[in-house]
Image: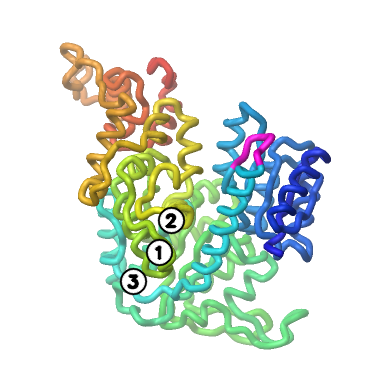
Amino acid sequence: MAAPILIVDDDPVQRRLLEGAVTRFGHEAILADGGEAALKALDGPQGRDIGAVILDLAMPGIDGLGVLKGMREREVALPVIVQTAQGGIETVVSAMRAGAFDFVVKPASPERLKTAITNALKVEAMEDARRTKRPPAGLITFRDLVTRGPAMERVIRLGQKAASSNIPILIEGESGVGKELVARAIQGSGERRGKPFVPVNCGAIPQNLVESILFGHEKGAFTGATEKHPGKFVEAHGGTLFLDEIGDLPPEVQVKLLRAVQEGEVDPVGARSTVKVDIRLISATHRDLLQQVRDGRFREDLYYRLHVFPIFVPPLRDRREDIEPLVTHFMARFARSQSSLKARTIAGSALAMLKAYDWPGNIRQLENAVFRAMVLSDGEMLSVEDFPQIRAQLEDIPELKHTAVDTSATSGKPEQLADASTATRDANAASGLADRRPMPAGIGALSALDQNGNVRTLAEVELEMIRLAIEHYGGQMSEVARRLGIGRSTLYRKLKEYGIDPETGRG
């Protein structure tokens, strides 16, 4: 029998119907009458055998979104098919953002349900194969970074300068932007190339084991210490230690880390003497460490020890020109590693849709989306329909609906498919974003001086520019953000800061 399917629904009638359908498809059905029971099943002995989850969103207690959150906290990466009643598109979009694979509308037809389960298991099987076959990262330099736009030029320039010295580096940026890749490029471009690169995710280590894993321990130092462990600092001796999510370190470990950075020596748990280490330290975080210092959650002296040479990696939504080369890179890599994948190109309309999306999970999310689309696609060209999650989320934004569903923006010629700018213009024309209001007389320039002849503040000029852009592009916020060279989320944040109503463009 095929992989078991976990059915989560508080309605006993719906559970029986789904159980009958899943059994007819050749799967064992595991039933849970609510969110708590579902998480318990995933934690239990059967949890590791489950192939997919059919999840009702509206349940008492822990609802569907709560289950998705619990799965994410447990790092359970099973494909989830959510169920919803008619009219629940906002909830569906939230579920897709939380990691759901697909959705079906109650009552789902057996054919629709079977297709969703088949696709989910197909993607999961290919994901397992990809994780198994993925080779260890070799030597990486800045030439290996896939980027085309100016947003990453500063990152590369700073990274190249940092590589020539032994200065402590703090890489800041949202999750999934490629902080570890930048760290590897720094190591691969410096004198320690070829030496050990030891990455540590500080946020993924249980708090009671952080000290032992970082600094090592002696045999018998505590219960369960049956043998000596050198620790990550000693493993990285002569090379580079990359401490990811350093903002998650507990306070007591921060003290020992400060000593290690200052003195170049570590104190293993249970040891009688310290151990000298020679490492290049690169730290990374998605948190605002300075705010954590203000809140008393991060040591100020350690912050200034780490924040010697900061490098900020911008989110993908602020460097959309990188999306096309990244998609091309991922498609080529997946095609090389798994010959069963047929897709080799992407339709211009699909590429325009990907460029319109904000990518809260950044490059990691884009990589997974491309891989999933290639698994689901039966043709040689990826289309809009191969990205159901992205399409569902964009359809929740009115001015992007046409971009998300337009599949005729380009022909099938490879030279046209590679032209992202053409695809974007076509998508904008289809959605009406290219239709601009005429420029009012006398509004073609911003004044640099105020009424008293003094230079205006940047905030005043920025506010006027935003108002002008909203008026000029008729309130089409995606076009406003694109023309201003910022992401939509950044635009909406600025609107909120200036007290501007996104609907009217007035404060």
Name the residue at 33% across, 73% down: 188
* Magenta stretch, residue numbers: 103-109
- Indicate the secondary structure of the residue bearing disc 3: loop
Q: Amino acid type of disc 2?
A: Met
Q: Which residue is mark 2?
A: 374
Left or right of 295 in this view: 280: left
Q: Amino acid type of disc 3?
A: Ile
What is the CA distance from the residue labelled 2 to the residue labelled 3? 26 Å
Identify the image quadrant of the N terminus: bottom right
Left or right of 77 in this view: 457: left
Camera sees residue 61: no
Q: Give the label, 2 or 3, closer to the camera.
A: 2
- Indicate the secondary structure of the residue bearing disc 1: helix
Give x and y (percent) for residue 110: 66, 43
Tag 2–tag 1 contact (CB < 8 Å): yes
The mark found on residue 334 in the picture is 1
Q: Which sits earlier in the primary sequence, circle 3 or circle 1?
A: 3
What is the CA distance from the residue labelled 3 to the residue labelled 1? 19 Å
Q: Is residue 107 magenta?
A: yes
Establish if 385 lies above or below 204: above
65 or 89: nearer the viewer = 89
